[in-house]
Image (spheres, rainbow, N blue to C red):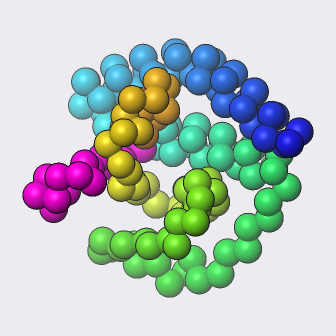
Amino acid sequence: MIRFILIIIFLIIFFILSIPLYILEWILRKTGHAKVANKIAKVVVGNGFKFCLFVSSVKVNITGLENIPKDQAVLFVANHRGFFDIVATYPNIPTIFGYVAKKEIMKVPGLNLWMHFINCLFIDRKNMKESI
């Protein structure tokens, strides 16, 4: 329970302190520097997730990163038993990528911006045509 409370406190502080980064990300994307913005978002979110893993005492064992092709598209599929799939994978995959997320998460302030910045695709699970 203490770890959960520490993560909640960290997330609140993270979302408040990252407000200037929201502005920087927005400016970079509007001025045509999306690659730089993607790299900044990858570092910021990746380090935030690493801190969450550290506080939770989660140890991630990675094998096979050398098998990920660098010159073609790749699809990663997790069993998604919880939100820690995202926390464990994002900081450990070296390339810039995004996640598919349900549309309802767009209603969470702060989180929705960072998800947009890390190239998440939001789908409406109730509208199958839109989801395709």
Measured as percent of width and height from the top left, residue 25 is found at 40, 26
Measured as percent of width and height from the top left, residue 119 is found at 35, 46
Can residue 132 be seen from the camera position used here?
yes
Left-right relation of 40 to 28: right
Say which residue appears at 52% left-offset and 15% top-offset.
20
Left-right relation of 6 to 131: right
Which of the two residues, 7 or 128, is positioned nearer the viewer here? 128
Quarter of the rendering containing residue 10:
top right
Quarter of the rendering containing residue 26:
top left
Q: Name the outermost residue toward the front.
A: 126
Q: Name the outermost residue toward the right.
A: 2
Measured as percent of width and height from the top left, residue 130 is found at 14, 52
Quarter of the rendering containing residue 58:
bottom right
Which of the two residues, 21 or 89, is positioned nearer the viewer here? 89
Provide the residue span drawn in magenta. 118-132
Say which residue appears at 75% left-offset and 27% top-offset.
9
Measured as percent of width and height from the top left, residue 128 is found at 16, 59
Residue 31, above or below 52: above
